[in-house]
Amino acid sequence: MNQDQAALRQQQQQQQRETKENWALRAGQWNEQADHLAKLAHGLNKPLVAAAGVARGHHVLDLASGVGEPALSMSELVGPTGSVTATDLVAEMLAGAERRAGDQGLNNMRFQVTPMEELPFEDDSFDAVTCRIGLMYTPSPERAASQARRVLRPGGRAAFMVWGPMADNSQFIIVDRVLREVAGIDPHEGAFTPTRLGDDGALNSVLEAGGFSAWEEQALRFSPRIPLESNFWRPQLALRIGGHLAAMTKGERQRIDDAMREAYRELVDGDRVQIQVHARIGIGTA
């Protein structure tokens, strides 16, 4: 490793530490919202799991499992002859996934705290690898892709889901604007960069650099209609800025709530808010 490579690696490791610290601060809110998040997960889980080719009897590695999805859902799919290994950089996150697996009586799961760029598994260990909404937060997505390819058995597939461009995701446009203009909070603090790999072709480039023999991208677009009076933005705010919210006065929280309601009013169509969601799946074959 030459001097420039060593400097880059050191920078990536520092970014990884900062990412870990910031997500650890959010872990409490994610655990509190885990059951709510699970109810919303099916629309994203189903195409991701299908893209990875997960089937009964498979041994699957899930990266950036957070508080449990899609790892818990895949546990039921692979059945007693298969297994799911759930991983996350943040121990506090993964503890929530392990607790929920125990509550559901899932006994074909394993849990491993690890960065996705440095997987502690043998080569050719898994039939499939999945990662839902996590790859864009690593400082080195190409290295993470390379590790996923290494642990895959020949012919196995890895599927990485990320958010699409900012302009195609109403939630990020509006929440970011309110955080910046009303709360004075940097919407990307703590390395929160959800649309970093959202452009067409970005995932293909990562998978090619990771050494996959074949790669492709799929676009997923949703247009959910949600009642404005449901205050649907509150869980997302808790996940994004839970620490800030806890330190705010009741009046300050109400000010953000009012601003969110007013901003989403721009998207009201009839009696519902029309949200635009764009996610992308990158599929690599080992």
Image (cartoon, rainbow, N blue to C red):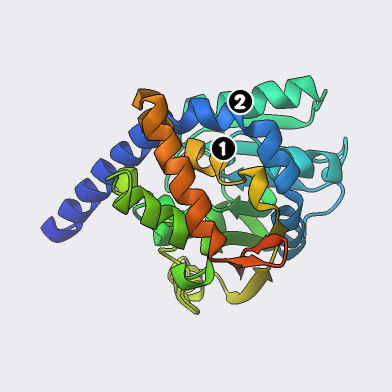
Residue 271: give x, y in percent of width and height.
72, 61
Query: Which is more toward the observer, 52 or 202?
Result: 202
Q: Is residue 208 left or right of residue 283?
A: left
Q: What residue is shown at x 60% (from left), y 67% (from top)?
A: 276
What kind of element bears circle 2? helix
Q: Looking at the picture, does residue 70 appear above or below residue 109?
A: below
Query: Which is more toward the observer, 181 or 129?
Result: 181
Q: Residues within 10 Å of mark 2 (few under 14, many from 20)?
A: many
Q: Looking at the picture, does residue 213 appear above or below residue 227?
A: below
Q: What residue is shown at x 85% (from left), y 45% (from top)?
A: 77
**How far apart, in angstroms, are the residues tagged by discs 1 and 2?**
8 Å
Q: Residue furthest left?
A: 3
Q: Count of labels shown?
A: 2
Q: The C terminus lies in which quarter of the figure? A: bottom right
Query: Which is more toward the observer, 257 or 68?
Result: 257
Query: Which is more toward the observer, 256 or 163?
Result: 256
Badge number at residue 108: none
Q: Looking at the picture, does residue 16 appear above or below residue 208?
A: above
Residue type pointed to by label 1:
Gly
Q: Is residue 30 left or right of residue 206?
A: right
Residue type pointed to by label 2:
Gly
Is residue 116 at least partly visible in the picture? Answer: no
Q: What residue is shown at x 73% (from left), y 31% (from top)?
A: 109
| Residue picked out by circle 1 | 66
Is residue 227 at least partly visible in the picture? Answer: yes
Q: Is residue 6 left or right of residue 226?
A: left
| Residue picked out by circle 2 | 96
What kind of element bears circle 1? loop
Q: The N terminus lies in which quarter of the figure? A: bottom left
Residue 18: give x, y in percent of width and height.
29, 38
Counting residues from the N terminus, which is met first, the one under dot 1 or under dot 2? Answer: 1
Asked if the residue at tag 2 contacts the one at tag 1, i.e. Cβ–Cβ closer than 8 Å, the answer is: yes
